[in-house]
Amino acid sequence: MNTDKVAINIERAVKRFGPFTALKAISLSIFDNEFFTLLGPSGCGKTTLLRMIAGFEDVTEGSIQLFGQEIENLPPNKRPVNTVFQNYALFPHMTVLENVAFGLEMRGVDKAQAGVKAGEMLELVHLTQFTNRKPSQLSGGQQQRVALARALAPQPKVLLLDEPLSALDLKLRKAMQIELKHLQRETGITFIFVTHDQEEALTMSDRIAVMSAGELQQLGAPRDIYEAPRNMFVADFIGETNLLEVSVEEIRGGKASCHLGGGHKLICNAIDGIGVGAKVHMSLRPERLFISETSTGRESLKGKIRENIFVGTDITTIVDLVDGPQFVVRTSNSDWGNKRIFDPGKDVFINMEQGASRLLLD
């Protein structure tokens, strides 16, 4: 990622479809050679923004610049971007090589040169042995790589990917996530990826823009967004968390003392915009909590085991606090560390890592 060079600059971009506003004054910059992800639930506006960058949708208000150039009046075929769609859109009557070469020939590249370049792209995506096959003779993952090779062949400055992995099964999706990231690094092209899958975004991205209802909720590196969600939507949408209603009783030395109900209190970092007396939400990630028979100090909460759920790599434990809310605690299913699992009905303490609790702007 080259943070010295901005590939795409979006300034207060608005998109309206009649009376409906799909995007509400979105502003963000995407760097050259960055793997950037637009993440959010269906209908949040992420695909609309991608289509505006591609030129398939007009900008109602605001502007989009590509490497410093205003592109509002440039038709899609004149923009140095290419798009990989969810359905791949391969020509069934053409071979794999012909599919990849087709776009180059449409741009005026000599047929022989287009064939050579197409072969290079197929080598890049590890499909050299399938050049003479038709798309119907390939697996879903192989078809997706053909679509990638075709999109990369003209050497666009930016590659747009609209949920390209959604049609693949889980194991293949995970394999393709790693392959896509390697491909982006190898080509040095800016990738803009659209998905509703949080794990997918966390796995591949240099940075993530979390969107909801046409608005940008948070922008940052995957770890920053996961560990320090700005508001309740981001905390709840990215991964699993314990969302607790709390009241702020005291703020001193940058720390907030919060009441959970039932006499339970937690100390966490204070944040701007939340003062004494505020009733807000707190986020605690399940993997940053652990259960023991004894209290480890003031960051301990007394409760009772409700149930244990085996989920393969982890064991999820549900704990009811005494006269308080319910907690989810996740323990790695491994022989390392403290892996003791307590039976339902057992009185226990929930302990937490330092800094595990975080106040959220609602």
Image: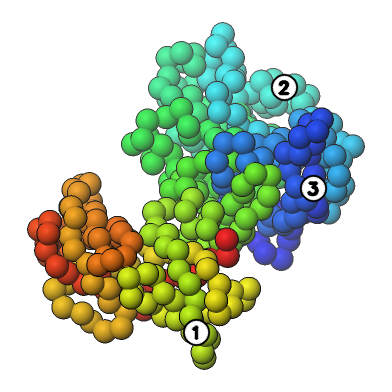
Give the colouring mode of the picture: rainbow
- Local SS, label 2: helix
Mark 2–mark 3 distance (CA, rounded to whole Å):
34 Å
Between 18 and 150, the one lying in front of the other is 18
Please report whichever mark, 3 or 1, sits nearer to the chain's N-terminal start: 3
Using the image, determine if residue 10 lies above or below residue 270. above
* Front tag of 3 and 1: 1
Q: Quadrant of residue 148?
A: top right
- Dot 1, how many residues are within 10 Å of its Cα: few (below 14), some (14-19), or many (20+)? some
**Residue name at image x 80 percent, y 36 percent:** 16
**Residue name at image x 30 percent, y 83 percent:** 298
Label ID, residue 105: 2
Give the x, y percent position of residue 181. 50, 48
Q: Amino acid at mark 3?
A: Ala
Q: Which residue is mark 1?
A: 250
Between 278 and 204, the one lying in front of the other is 278
Q: Is residue 199 left or right of residue 7?
A: left
- Dot 2, how many residues are within 10 Å of its Cα: few (below 14), some (14-19), or many (20+)? some
- Local SS, label 1: strand
Give the x, y percent position of residue 255. 49, 84
Using the image, determine if residue 248 lies above or below residue 210. below
**Residue name at image x 52 percent, y 66 percent:** 280
Give the x, y percent position of residue 260. 39, 70
Please report whichever mark, 2 or 1, sits nearer to the chain's N-terminal start: 2
Q: Which residue is mark 3?
A: 13
* Front tag of 2 and 3: 3
Mark 2–mark 1 distance (CA, rounded to whole Å):
68 Å
Numbered disc total: 3
